[in-house]
């Protein structure tokens, strides 16, 4: 899966944004923290949910693995719901 070309990811300081461009069905933006930015950067290239989870587990080694898995799954579901992923 990877980020749909109709969406623009932008990082600004400690905040990250995913903005729908004119031809996307979703009209709006998704705002999050730097962790969102890391995941969106990874999604610029073809990647898997497992690779996203592994990157977050490496970055947040003290976090419970099931929390990381759940958070990544929720993010992917949100991105799917607005049409931001090509799968």
Image (cartoon, rainbow, N blue to C red):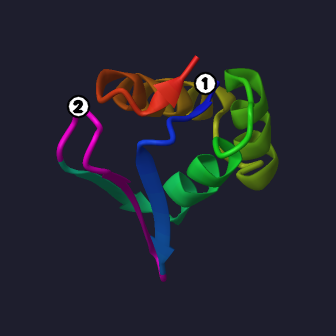
- Magenta range is 13-27
Q: Which mark is residue 66?
A: 1
Drawn side of residue 42 relative to residue 15, left or right: right
Q: Position of residue 9 (x, y in %)?
A: 48, 58
Drawn side of residue 61 relative to residue 20, left or right: right
- Is 25 or 62 nearer to us in this picture? 25
Quadrant in the rendering for residue 33: bottom left
Q: Which residue is mark 2?
A: 25
Figure check: 25 above or below 27 = above
Q: Position of residue 24 (x, y in %)?
A: 29, 37
Q: In this rendering, which labeled residue sits more in front, label 1 or label 2?
A: 2
Q: Residue at x 61, y 47 (%)?
A: 39
Q: Secondary structure at mark 1?
A: helix
Question: How would you classify the magenta stretch by its main secondary structure?
Answer: loop
Could you tell me which quadrant the C terminus lies in?
Answer: top right
Q: Could you give the CA–CA distance between mark 1 and mark 2, rounded to whole angstroms?
A: 32 Å
Q: Residue at x 36, y 27 (%)?
A: 83
Drawn side of residue 66 relative to residue 5, left or right: right
């Amino acid at each position: 899966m990877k980020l749909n070309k109709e969406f623009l990811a932008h990082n600004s300081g400690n905040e990250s944004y995913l903005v729908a461009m004119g031809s996307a069905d979703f009209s709006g933006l998704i705002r999050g923290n730097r962790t969102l930015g890391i995941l969106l950067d990874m999604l610029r290239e073809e990647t898997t949910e497992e690779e996203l989870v592994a990157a977050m587990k490496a970055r947040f080694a003290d976090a419970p693995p099931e929390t990381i898995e759940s958070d990544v799954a929720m993010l992917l579901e949100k991105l799917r719901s607005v049409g931001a992923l090509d799968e």
